[in-house]
Structures are given as structure tokens and as C-alpha cells.
Image: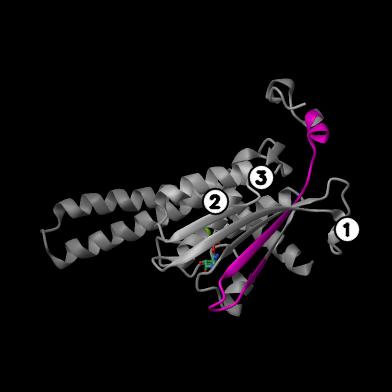
Amino acid sequence: AREQVARAQKLEAVGLLAGGIAHDFNNVLTTIVGAAHLAALDAPEGSDIAMEIEQIDIAAQRAQSLVHGLLTFARREPGKPQAINLCDIVREVTRLLRASLPPTIHMTCADEHGKFLVMADHTHLHQIVMNLCRNAAEAIGGAEGSITISVTKLSQGLLEDQKPRPEGWVQLEIRDDGPGMSLETRKHLFDPFFTTKPLGKGSGLGLVVVAGLVEEMGGTISVESAPGEGACFTIRLPGTSQSEAVPEITAKDIPRGHE
Ligand code: ADP
Ligand code: MG
């Protein structure tokens, strides 16, 4: 619980930072990039000074993309919860990822035709699954490996540490057989800006966003991993039924033929 409070405080700090100074910071960076471009025009081609100006330009542009990520993060849409079948989202994400993943990464979705309803914003749920799958794929990298996604239903009796819910819980497990992570990495996994990836590759905000969204939905996230043992992220979201969901969405949003 103390860990969760600490994380919430960090999240709030990130939000404040993003909302408060990221915008001004972006203006400063725009000036730097602009001035670097002008200076580059005056610098003799191939000279030391030209190379140094290029370094300034590259660094400032990296900083800009970081700030951009922060702003996107802070301006997150509040979201419009509706009853969604988690399997539909998993199918969407796997379809998108299959196109870009190296063919050595396999994705399987256990129980692909089950109905696993949760109250969630479509984009947010998509973001959660996508971020976790991307991390798994990036961990495997160019190596041979597989990602296994499973969606299951948990009846309330199964969980000792969670609030009883008549609708039970929907559990999403994303497992990879990549390199796994050290205890040190696992400790800082959810820290804003924590990344083990090279500059420009990782923002260290992926899991912060995931954890924030899951918490907003009243769910939990946990991870099991050790070096050489792959990683498994488990997310549990409160289940829902269509009847419970209907009053929370406006009439025009109710899909036809679902009752
Ligand atoms: P980013 O992907 O930008 O680095 P994340 O917040 O998504 O930021 O992840 C933070 C760090 O957690 C990663 O840099 C990586 O070290 C570690 N990590 C996340 N998922 C996995 C995984 N499936 N296997 C191994 N390490 C992981
Ligand atoms: Mg990531």
C-alpha cells in the first residue's frame, strides 16, 4: 500500500511537471533548435564548429520528443468507459503487432472466443495491452522468442487480497520468454522515466501510463520476472455485465443487438 501511495505521488509530480513547465520548456527548445539551424548556415561545412552545432541540434530534438511524450501523457483524455470484451482488444493489438513483429515472435490468445467484459475506455485499454506487448517484444528483441497472452475470468472466491465483486474479475496475463529483468529493474519498473533502453528508444513512461490507467479502472497490476526467466505481467480488472454497463453510457453508444 505504501508503494502505491509513493507511486501515486510520483505520478502526480509527473503530471504537475508536465502541465506546468513542459510547455514553456518546449518553447525554449524551439529557440535552441532554431538558433542551431541558423548557426549551422554560417558554420564552414565539415568544421568542428559545424559538428558541435549538429550535436546541439540532435540533443535539443531529443529533448523535444521527450517533452512531447510528457505533454501527451499529461493531457490524457479522461476516457469514456463502456463495457468492452477484453478479448476484442487483445485481438486488435495482436493484429496490429503481427504486422510489425519479427516472425519469430508468436502470439497466442487463450480462449479467443470468450466474453470477458470490463468497464473501460477503449483507447485506454488498447494502450495498456499495446504497451505491455511492445515491452515484451522489445525485451525479446531480435532473438527467438514468444509472447503468450491469456485472458481469464476469476470468480471472487479465488482472490484473497481483492475486494469481493459480484461480477468477479477479468485477468489479463502477458508472458514473454525474453531475458527477464533483474531485481533492481523490477524495483524501479513503475518509476517515471525509468528505462534500460538506449536514449531515443525508451521514454520510461510506458509502465507509468499502464499502471495509472489500471489504477483508474480499479484494477491491479503485478509482475513476475527474474534474469533469464522471462517476464509475466498480470492485470486484474473489475468484471462487468452488459446490464450493469447500460446506465453508464448514453443511448446512442449502446450497440445494437447486445441485449
Ligand atoms: P520503456 O519501454 O520506454 O523503457 P517502460 O515503462 O515501458 O519504459 O518499461 C520500463 C523498463 O522496464 C524497460 O526499460 C525494461 O527495462 C523493463 N521491462 C518492461 N517490460 C519488460 C519485459 N517484458 N521484459 C524485460 N524487461 C522489461
Ligand atoms: Mg515501454
What secondary structure is marked by label 1? helix
Tell me how many marks there are: 3
Q: How is the image coloured?
A: one colour
Q: In which quadrant will I find the C terminus? A: top right
Q: Residues within 10 Å of mark 2 (few under 14, many from 20)?
A: many
The residue that label 1 is drawn on is: 157
Q: Nearer the viewer, residue 127 or 209?
A: 127
Secondary structure at numbered mark 2: helix
Residue at 59% x, 51% y: name it.
Answer: 129
The answer to whether residue 35 is visible is yes
Q: Earlier in the sequence, mark 1 or mark 2?
A: 2
The kind of residue tagged 2 is Met
* Residue numbers of the magenta segment: 223-246
Q: Position of residue 83 (x, y in %)?
A: 72, 37
Q: Position of residue 138 (x, y in %)?
A: 46, 62
Picture layout, residue 188 above or below residue 28: below
* Kind of residue at badge 1: Gly
Instruction: Identify the residue under disc 2.
Output: 130
| Cα distance in 3D space between marks 1 and 2 | 30 Å
Q: Which residue is mark 3?
A: 86
Q: Is residue 226 magenta?
A: yes
- At x 11%, y 63%, the residue is 46
Residue 257 lies left or right of residue 148; in this view the side is: right
Give the CA separation, mark 2 to mark 3: 12 Å
First in sequence, mark 2 or 3: give its number: 3
Dots 1 and 3: beta carbons under 8 Å?
Answer: no
